[in-house]
Amino acid sequence: MARDMSDIDILKMELEQLKKEVSTPREPVSKTSKDTMDWCEAASCTDLLITGVPDDKNPYKPEKGGWKNIMLYLHRNTWQTYCSYVSLFTGLKRLKLERRNRRDVH
Amino acid sequence: ILNSGCNNNVKGKVKGCEPRVLSLQNILSLILFLLPASALTTGIYMIFSTKPEMATQEVQPNETLTNLKAESDTLKTKLEDERAKLHDVELHQVAEKVDGLGQFIMKTRRTLKGHGNKVLCMDWCKDKRRIVSSSQDGKVIVWDAFTTNKEHAVTMPCTWVMACAYAPSGCAVACGGLDNKCSVYPLSLDKNENLAAKKKSVAMHTNYLSACSFTNSDMQILTSSGDGTCALWDVESGQLLQSFHGHAADVLCLDLAPSETGNTFVSGGCDKKANVWDMRSGQCIQSFETHESDINSVRYYPSGDAFASGSDDATCRLYDLRADREVAIYSKESIIFGASSVDFSLSGRLLFGGYNDYTINVWDVLKGTRVSILFGHENRVSTLRLSPDGTAFCSGSWDHTLRIWA
């Protein structure tokens, strides 16, 4: 509708609005800024982005597929890790032996 | 004529000249002569008398335009003077005694991939977990932010779905764009159900829908449009409850006041103005025009006494409603791209701004300084919203993804 209005109509609308606004009650900036600041300080303790959230409470903190996460997971399962390392090591050794045997056979 | 009947040899023969008699013939000839003459004179008079009138009619419209402009300029200066009288201190001066914020580290914790085109708008559900997002290709997707699973997907019949909103109950989503309408889709637990079949068209505008938002209930929806108006609709009947006229150009964004403070909302438009409206009366209560370009996004301060706006002039500004003026500008010379969306943290200490240079700048609201820049998106950031519990915020971008930062 603003697109259909002529320049005069738009100016008249703005003029009426300005007439209303000149008489609105206003407070000094020092008072309102102080109020805003006080409100902000009071609410800061509830603002989790400022106070921070411990990782285990934050639903987003365990990143899916991050490197840190993998290490954490591995650390938590040290016995499993140990076993897997051991099996990997023994498997590699067996492979080496097999290769040596094959060479000797040839 | 009278002498025509007289003898021509007048000289020396005046005594001999017979006096002319006004006979009938003569009278008739007199009248005949005078008639066209009089007609001519009256005609000429009429032409001359109307000409000045027409001249004044042509001058009138120009005079009214200039008169109106002059009057509005004088009122504007008067308004500025009134406002300036109360501008005794700057916000950052008052906030000097506040502790500075420590180092701020936020990273992308989740990336929601699935949209086939630019993500234009997103909204959180009140359960702090679900997100609805809309994109240029007409798809509206409901995600679970914790698991990044898609829960529902709807294809709208139009492209450029620029507005989407989640109902407070979590049972419906509203979206709209180039189709000039706002459609409400009730969400069901059954994933196989065709959501498009239950669509309800609520709002009808004469130009594109730029933003929509549910009020405190599922029953009313507030929309803003490219036709320069905002409107309040009843969802059930589709009836227009209130319309808000006052912008001189497209309205690009709106935000409802936090529920404690009452029935007002703020809208920003391409006419560089941000207007605060009373929802019941439809009147514009306050208006602010300090931006130098289109206002892309407005957001109320959590206390309800102020609001921030992000604009194409690369600045974000904070306006105090009780002091009726702009109290802070968040800008840097290195930032030259416009801000497309802004949001506050829960306490209002931080202002997050998504910019067209692919970054998100985090500003300290009270001190006016930049706290942090967040990189990650590969195209301009189009939308940004804080989660309802304030633990994270989600940003949508033209690189087809949404990122959750915490």
Image (cartoon, coloured by chain):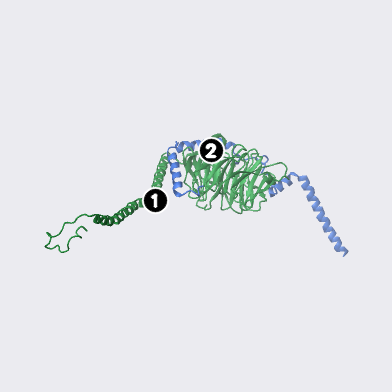
Using the rendered image, report if marks 1 and 2 lie on a common chain. yes
Residue at label 1?
B62
Verify CB contact (< 8 Å) between mark 1 and mark 2: no
What is the chain identity of the residue bearing mark 1? B
Quarter placement of the C terminus of chain B: top right
Q: Which amino acid lies under the numbered mark 2 shown in the image of this protein?
A: Met
Q: As drawn, which residue projects farthest toward the right?
A: A105
Residue B352 shows in the view: no
Q: Residue at x 13, y 60 (%)?
A: B16
Chain shown blue: that is A
Chain shown green: that is B
| Label 1 SS | helix
Q: Earlier in the sequence, mark 1 or mark 2?
A: 1
Disc 2: CA contacts within 10 A as few (<14), some (14-19) or many (>=20) = many
Q: Is residue A44 left or right of residue B24?
A: right
Q: Is residue A82 left or right of residue B99?
A: right
* Residue B394 percent across, percent down from the top left: 62, 46
Seen from the viewer's position, the closer of residues A101 and B402 is: B402
- Check residue B211 in the rendering and tell me which mark sits there, or answer none: none
Residue B395 shows in the view: yes
Give the CA distance from mark 1 to mark 2. Answer: 36 Å
* Residue B30 percent across, percent down from the top left: 25, 56
Seen from the viewer's position, the closer of residues B39 and B163 is: B39
Q: Nearer the viewer, mark 1 or mark 2?
A: 1
Q: Residue at x 24, y 54 (%)?
A: B24
Residue at label 2?
B279
Q: Which amino acid lies under the numbered mark 1 shown in the image of this protein?
A: Asn
When the figure is inspected, residue B236 is found, relative to residue B6, above or below; the finding is above
Q: Residue at x 38, y 52 (%)?
A: B58
* Residue B298 percent across, percent down from the top left: 54, 44
